[in-house]
Amino acid sequence: MNEVVLRSILIEDWIKFVLIICALLIIAARFTSGEKFQHLIKFWNIHRYFIYKTGQTIPVITSTNILMFFNRVFTSTILILYLLNGLFSLKINWDNYLLILVIISIFIGLKYIIEKTLSKLLGFSKKLTEINRYRIALKNLFSLHLYFFLIFIIFNDFSSKFITRVSAILILIYTLLSYSFILKKYSPNNSKSLIYFISYLCAFEIAPILILVLYLINIGKL
């Protein structure tokens, strides 16, 4: 067995290990969320996830949200590594995985600090909590679907460019549907709130995706 084939097998086993961890996180989230989890799977029925019993709404910080947060970070890191390097590239290893994981974690931390600071300065804290309730649940939905999408592309023979294009299209669709849903539920009642919402969306949600897409175009993967 030559070195390239052996390396591919090792990389595939390494990705399988991460996917198993993610599967355990999803299973744990299923048990901690109870009957709410079924509403998380169906985007067209997602409103049932937020208010699943009369007079009861889900809090922002729950064990389910924490478990799905880690699942989202782990799966997103795999996807970003793959989009940048290809599934069996020698650059896909534990060190680079940790590097991307740290970068994503720092970005999330900075985003959280900036959100909290701006919301307090603009008197937007209460609205931000409402937005986060919808946003976190929709990102839980995304991480769940992303897990199955990764399994689909990893264990099938597709070209790198095809998967990159499909991934970009699906992420764009998810982003548009998610924030149109949030905007509809949130319904800003003044121009300041609307400007804050649009500015946040452009700076922290659209800009990172746009930067990644432009980079992929620049290196010829899109």
Image (tube, rainbow, N blue to C red):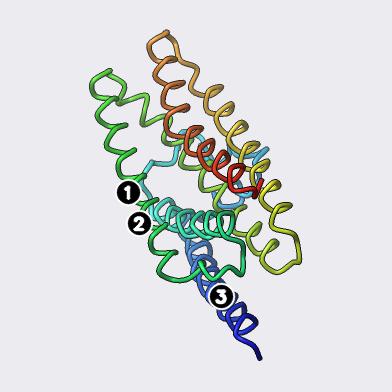
In this picture, residue 181 sits left or right of residue 127 = right
Residue 177: x %, y % from top left:
62, 32
Tell me: residue 33, above or below residue 2.
Answer: above
Query: Sequence order check: which comes first, mark 1 or mark 3?
Result: 3
Residue toward you, 87 or 183? 87
Residue toward you, 43 or 87? 87
- Residue at label 3? 11
Residue 10: x %, y % from top left:
56, 80
Task: Determine the image quadrant of residue 170.
Answer: top right
Q: Name the secondary structure under disc 2.
A: helix
Q: Cβ–Cβ below 8 Å for labels 2 and 3?
A: no
In this picture, residue 185 sits left or right of residue 160 = left
Image mark count: 3
Q: Residue at x 47, y 54 (%)?
A: 68
Residue toward you, 2 or 84? 2
Tell me: residue 134, above or below residue 185.
Answer: below
Q: Residue at x 39, y 54 (%)?
A: 66
Give the amino acid at mark 2.
Answer: Val
Give the amino acid at mark 3.
Answer: Ile
Residue 134: x %, y % from top left:
48, 35
- Residue at label 2? 102
Residue 94: x %, y % from top left:
44, 71
Q: Residue at x 55, y 29 (%)?
A: 179
The reply to whether residue 51 is visible in this rendering is yes
What is the CA distance from the residue labelled 1 to the residue labelled 2?
A: 6 Å
Q: Name the secondary structure under disc 1.
A: helix
Give the amino acid at mark 1.
Answer: Ile
- Residue at label 1? 106
